[in-house]
Image: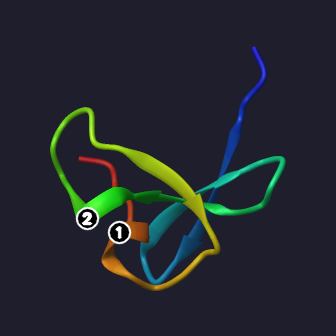
Amino acid sequence: MRRLFQWGATDGYRQPRARLSGKCVNVVGVSTENLSLLEQRICGTAASFHWSRT
């Protein structure tokens, strides 16, 4: 199975990055709901780029 994302870490949070584009995965609308929409964007510091395991 080929992994499509790799994990980067910044300020205690993790940022999943697409392997091919190098862009970060962003949650559209900073949602925390199941089945939220995702998009690839240039990495930033907005809350929608901060991922953590719960």
Instruction: Look at the numbered disc 1 and give the secondary structure of its residue.
Output: helix
Q: Which mark is residue 30?
A: 2
Q: Amino acid at mark 2?
A: Val
Quarter of image, res 46: bottom left
| Left or right of residue 51, residue 23 in this image | right
Q: Is residue 54 above or below residue 41?
A: above
| Left or right of residue 1, residue 9 in this image | left
Q: Is residue 44 above or below residue 33?
A: below
Q: Coloring scheme of the render?
A: rainbow
* Residues at circles 2 and 1 in contact by the CB criterion of under 8 Å: yes
Look at 49% across and 64% down and name the residue there.
14
- Whole-number angstrom distance, CA of label 2 to CA of label 1: 5 Å
Look at 72% across and 30% down and name the residue there.
3
Q: Which mark is residue 48?
A: 1
Q: Residues within 10 Å of mark 1 (few under 14, many from 20)?
A: some
Q: Residues within 10 Å of mark 2 (few under 14, many from 20)?
A: some
Look at 20% across and 35% down and name the residue there.
34
Q: Where is residue 36 drawn, in percent x and y? A: 28, 42
Q: Is residue 31 above or below residue 49?
A: above
Quarter placement of the N terminus: top right
